[in-house]
Image (cartoon, grey):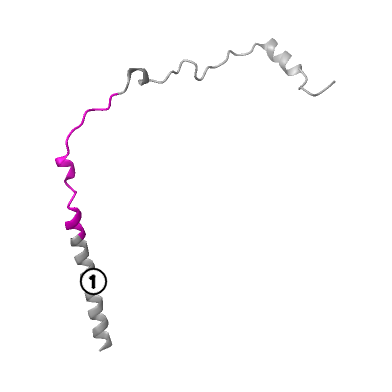
Amino acid sequence: MKRILALAACLLVAASMLGGCSYIRGKFGNKQDAYKSGTQVRPLEVPPDLDRPNTSGTLVIPAAATDAARASASTVAPPGDAA
């Protein structure tokens, strides 16, 4: 008897859950084809002064040092080191 009541309770719960799915689908609608009823809007307009960022001073590569400049830089004592 307990087994039949447990089975009936499980069936009742399963039926109410499946019924809830159709309720939610009916409440919010089927939105699979929502793109078909959409309207086209104007394209985004970018102001002319914001078209491209100013890149004139970015990634400036310094000129290569000459051999004389490298030699003098390597013989200079680091700051705070009194010789």
Residue drawn at 71 percent across, 16 percent down: 73
Position of the N terminus by quadrant:
bottom left
Q: Position of residue 62 (x, y in %)?
A: 57, 15
Please give left or right for residue 68 compared with residue 28 in the image: right
Q: Is residue 18 above or below residue 62?
A: below
Q: Quadrant of residue 77?
A: top right
Circle 1 packing at 10 Å, graded few (<14), some (14-19), many (20+), is few
State the residue in front, 22 or 80.
22
Q: Amino acid at mark 1?
A: Ala
Q: Position of residue 3 (x, y in %)?
A: 27, 85
* 42 magenta-colored: yes
Q: Position of residue 26 (x, y in %)?
A: 16, 57
Residue drawn at 17 percent across, 39 percent down: 38
Residue identifier under label 1: 14
Label 1 element class: helix
**How many numbered discs, if any?**
1
State the residue in front, 52 or 61.
52
**What residue span does the magenta drawing correspond to?**
24-45
* 78 magenta-colored: no
Q: Position of residue 65 (x, y in %)?
A: 63, 13
* Name of the residue lying farthest toward the bottom: 1
Residue drawn at 81 percent across, 23 percent down: 81
